[in-house]
Image: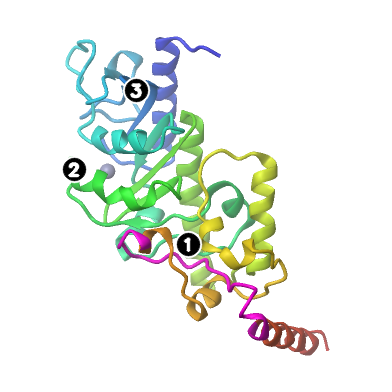
Amino acid sequence: MYKSDYEIKKELCEIGRRIYNDGFVAANDGNFSVKIDDNTYYVTPTGVSKGFMTPDMICKVDGEGKLKESNGPWRPSSEFKMHLKVYQERPDVKSVVHAHPPIATSFAIAGIPLDKLIMPEAIIFLGAVPIAQYGTPSTMEIPESLTPYLQDYDAILLANHGALSFGCDLNTAFFRMESTEFYAKLLFYARMLGGEQEIPCGEVKKLVELRKEFGVPGKHPMEKLCPGCYAGDDTCAMSPTDANEKYGVESSAAYHGFQPLPSQVCPTPSGNADIEAIVKEVTKRVLEQYNK
Ligand SMILES: [Zn+2]
C-alpha cells in the first residue's frame, strides 16, 4: 500500500515516542530511518528528543545522506552513515533503528553477545545478536564494524554504545529493538537466578523450521552456525554452547576474521555419532535419576 510522505513522517514520530517512552534512549539520543528508494530516505533529525518530534522535523535525504529538500533548522542525524551501510549491504532492509536500550547496551558494554538460545520466540523471530567492534560515533568506524554481521543478523550490539536493528519496514525494525532488549532482560534475570539453561540443539532446529513455516522475513544465523543439526540430526540433546565448546565450527564472523564466535554450533551427525550416543545415554540416565 502506498503511504504518503506525511504518513511516513508521522510514523517515524510515533516510533520515536515509543522508543523514548520505553526508555530506550535518553535526551536527544537515537536515530532511525525509512528507505523509499536507493536515493530517497526519511531520517530523524539531530539534536532533537525522539520523544517530541513533529512531522516537519523529519529530514528527506539522498543516497549520500544529503538533504533533498531544505528543512528549516533540522539536520539529519550524523549517524545516518551507519544506516546507509545497512541499506547498501542488505537490499531487503527498508528501515533501520538505532537506540541505547539500557540492558542490551549493558551487555554491549560488558562485551557479552546475546547468543544464548534460551527462548523460542527469540530464536524464531530474532535469532542471535552479536557485538560489533567499538567505533567512534559519526565516523565511518561504526558502519565498517557492521560488515561481518550484516548477512546473518537482523540486530547487532555496538560495543560500549548501543544497539542497531533493521527490517522490511519501520515496525519490524522497531520490534527487533524491543525483542533485543527483552531478550537481554531475560538473560540478565536468568543469570541472577543462577544461569540460563539453553534449549538443546535438536529443539533449536525445530524452532528454525517453524520460522521458515511462518515466513519470518530477514536473516537468521542458525543455518550456518548449526551445520550438524541442519544435516538432519534433530535428536541432538546437547546445549548449543556445550556443542560449540566441543566442536568449534567456523562462523561467518570468524570467516571474516572477526570475533566473537557466536556460540550456537552443533556437532555434525557423521563422525560424531559415537559422542552423540554417549551424550544421549548420559542424558537418559540423568533423567532416570531425576524421575526416581
Ligand atoms: Zn548511539
Which residue is pictured at 17% across the width and 16% down the height? Answer: 73
Asked if the residue at tag 2 contacts the one at tag 3, i.e. Cβ–Cβ closer than 8 Å, the answer is no
| Residue receiving disc 3 | 38
Asked if the residue at tag 1 contacts the one at tag 2, i.e. Cβ–Cβ closer than 8 Å, the answer is no
Q: CA distance from mark 2 to mark 1?
A: 26 Å
Question: Residue 218 bears which disc, if any?
Answer: none
Type of amino acid under label 3: Asp
**Horizontal and vertical percent for residue 110?**
32, 65
Helix, strand or loop at mark 2: loop
Helix, strand or loop at mark 1: loop
Type of amino acid under label 1: Asp
Q: CA distance from mark 3 to mark 2?
A: 20 Å
User: Which residue is outermost to the front?
Assistant: 270
* Main secondary structure along the magenta-highlighted residues: loop
Question: Residue 140 bears which disc, if any?
Answer: 2
| Residue receiving disc 1 | 115
Which residue is pictured at 22% across the width and 12% down the height? Answer: 71
Mark 2 or mark 1: whose residue is earlier in sequence: 1
Q: Which residues are magenta?
A: 255-275
Q: Quadrant of ligand 1?
A: top left
